[in-house]
Amino acid sequence: FISMWYVMVTFTTVGYGDMIPTTLSGRLVASGVMMISLVLFAVPITIISSIFTEQHTLREREIVDRDLFMKRKLLREVLTIEGGGMNRI
């Protein structure tokens, strides 16, 4: 069980510190607190980052759609000025 304690401490990047629990129950409680704190930070961070990623993707699509619309509009104007050609693009 000692090796599992060191795995838990290393995994959660808590560090070994000057004071460590020496009893089995102390290590179990400390391991539980480490895992709960990891979940409490990890879940909100992933939700917030996914929202940012979604908003960024939507904004990029809007920019691409706007550019495509402007290019088509310019092409229509050029074809109209040149006296015809294609009526619809």
Image (cartoon, grey):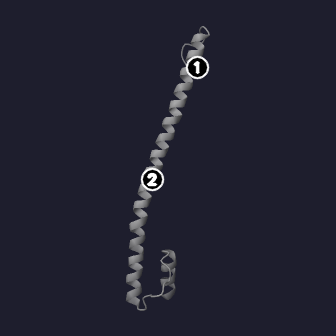
Dot 2 amino acid type: Ser
Q: Measured along the vertical axis of the image, is residue 52 above or below residue 23? A: above
Residue 44 x, y percent position in the rendering: 40, 60
Q: Which residue is mark 1?
A: 75
Q: Measured along the vertical axis of the image, is residue 42 above or below residue 81? A: below
The quadrant in which the C terminus is found is top right
Residue 26 x, y percent position in the rendering: 39, 87
Dot 1 amino acid type: Leu
Closer-to-camera residue (80/89): 80
Residue 46 figure quarter? bottom left
With 11 as the anchor, is 24 left or right in this view? left
Q: Earlier in the sequence, mark 2 or mark 1?
A: 2
Q: Which residue is mark 2?
A: 50
Residue 2 x, y percent position in the rendering: 49, 88
Q: CA distance from mark 2 to mark 1?
A: 38 Å
Residue 23 figure quarter? bottom left
